[in-house]
Image (tube, helix red, strand yellow):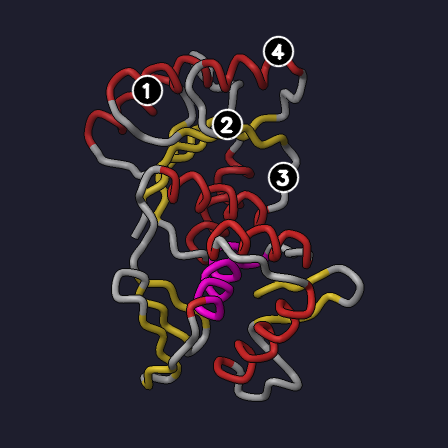
């Protein structure tokens, strides 16, 4: 299970973030300032650090610098400071992403997972409902029984799993599949593959509970 350190001096945001991330399968600890964050980083291993710029003591830039100087840990700034100087300074300090407050929790989780993947920290097992994907073995099971997916069906499922809670337009899905497959995937082909995927993973493909259509916009996996 991923360990995330939240460096934030607003207890309301700490509690909200901690509760939400725990529901998403993460473990969290928090620090309200630079000294406490540094002490935790010395004692424990974390997979990712979320940092606000304004802290009880020191500032987020100092924490980011300390993290990057000692360990190869991904850092995401989560801050109400949205001016260009703050964003550029954060990224120049070595941050891997910068998210403005107020933020959408599902989007934050998606961007956390994206950064973790870039660091090679992606989990080998992914679950949603009774579907279990073993990325290391490239197997998919539903209710304990293995289901056989074509290469593109499998890649499409991984795209949805990696972007849970995020609306994916058809153009986004097409571009992702193009990058993965190296072959041309057109709009009609995408429709066919979504239909086939639903037939294999949904209890009732006509009323999908995993890959849902958002009419006129795209698809979302809850």
Tell me if residue 34 comes above or below residue 49 in the rendering: above
| Neighbourhood count class around disc 3 (C-alpha, 10 Å): few under 14, some 14–19, many 20 upward | few
Pointer 2 residue: 77
Nearest to N terminus: mark 1 or mark 2: 1
Above or below — where is 96 with respect to 217?
above
Earlier sequence position, callout 1 versus callout 4: 1
Q: Which residue is mark 4?
A: 85
Taking the spot 65% from the left edge, 84% from the top edge, the residue there is: 207
Disc 1 on helix, strand or loop?
helix
Query: Residue 157 placed where, x, y %?
Result: 48, 66
Q: CA distance from mark 4 to mark 2?
A: 13 Å
- Quickly name the residue at label 3: 103
- Residue contact at pointers 1 and 2, CB within 8 angstroms: no
Residue under the image location 51 percent in, 25 percent down: 52
Give the number of callouts.
Answer: 4
SS at badge 3: loop
Picture quadrant of residue 65? top left
Residue extent of the magenta highlight: 152-165
- Chief secondary structure of the magenta portion: helix
Q: CA distance from mark 3 to mark 4?
A: 19 Å
Q: Which of marks 2 and 3 precedes in the sequence?
A: 2
């Amino acid at each position: 299970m991923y360990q995330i350190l939240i460096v934030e001096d607003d207890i309301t945001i700490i509690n909200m973030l901690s509760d939400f991330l725990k529901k998403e399968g993460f473990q969290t600890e928090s620090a309200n300032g630079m000294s406490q964050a540094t002490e935790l980083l010395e004692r424990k291993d974390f997979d990712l650090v979320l940092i606000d710029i304004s802290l009880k003591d020191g500032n987020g830039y100092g924490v980011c610098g300390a993290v990057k100087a000692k360990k190869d840990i991904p850092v995401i700034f989560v801050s109400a400071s949205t001016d260009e100087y703050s964003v550029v300074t954060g990224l120049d300090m070595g941050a891997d992403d910068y998210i403005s407050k107020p933020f959408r929790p599902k989007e934050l989780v998606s961007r956390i997972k994206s950064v973790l993947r870039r660091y090679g920290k992606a989990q080998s097992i992914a679950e949603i409902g009774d579907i279990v994907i073993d990325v290391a073995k490239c197997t998919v099971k539903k209710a304990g029984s293995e289901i056989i997916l074509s290469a593109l069906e499998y890649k499409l499922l991984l795209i949805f799993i990696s972007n849970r809670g995020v609306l994916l337009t058809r153009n986004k899905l097409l571009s992702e599949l193009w990058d993965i497959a190296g072959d041309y995937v057109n709009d009609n082909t995408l429709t066919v593959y979504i239909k086939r995927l639903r037939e294999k993973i949904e209890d009732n493909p006509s009323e999908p509970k995993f890959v849902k259509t958002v009419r006129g916009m795209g698809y979302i996996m809850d």
